[in-house]
Amino acid sequence: MEEYEEWRKGFHSGQITFDEVVQNLYEEQEENEQLQAVNVALQTEVAQGQQYFSEVAKAREALRLARDSFAGTHEANKQLHAENERLKEENRRIPVSERLPKSLVDVVIFSKGIKDWSMGHYVKNKGWFNRVASRYTERVTHWKPVI
């Protein structure tokens, strides 16, 4: 505004010609248009920055949720693994060389050379009795408790 006032005074005093005033106005308008273009570009960058930070905030929230979910899943997985190990141990075939069941307690027996399992029990000082075959056998290699 001060510059315009100087041009007006200079024009009225004859120090500046009309053409110079017009030229100065065109230059001012061109500079103003350039500044507006820069302003629009900056506003676009600001909007993009806000969108970027909004996306970053969403990504951080998704990461937090995933981390919380993973922690819960990891803990559940540890519990399931422990339960699986317990069940494996509980249901594994126990070699007769490792230990024998209590005498006269029915167990599942596995015999050498026979693909299928059978029911039987161990009798102390007598050996293995196969309930299905109704006879004693010396071929038992593994056993497991009846669940």
Image: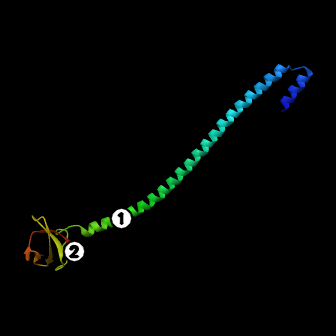
- The answer to whether 100 is drawn above or below residue 81 in the figure is below
- The answer to whether 114 is drawn above or below residue 63 in the figure is below
Identify which amino acid the numbered label 1 is placed on. Answer: Leu
Reading the image, the residue beneath label 2 is 146
Task: Report the front residue among 132 and 30.
Answer: 30
Identify which amino acid the numbered label 2 is placed on. Answer: Val
Task: Report the front residue among 90 and 73.
Answer: 73
Is the residue under label 1 in contact with that under label 2 (CB below 8 Å)?
Answer: no
At x 83%, y 23%, the residue is: 21
At x 62%, y 43%, the residue is: 47
Question: Which label sits on residue 101?
Answer: none
Q: Residue 31: give x, y in percent of width and height.
A: 73, 28
Q: Label 2 to label 1, Cα distance in Å?
A: 23 Å
Reading the image, the residue beneath label 1 is 80
Q: Quadrant of residue 10?
A: top right
Q: Residue 22: give x, y in percent of width and height.
A: 81, 23
Q: Residue 48: give x, y in percent of width and height.
A: 60, 42
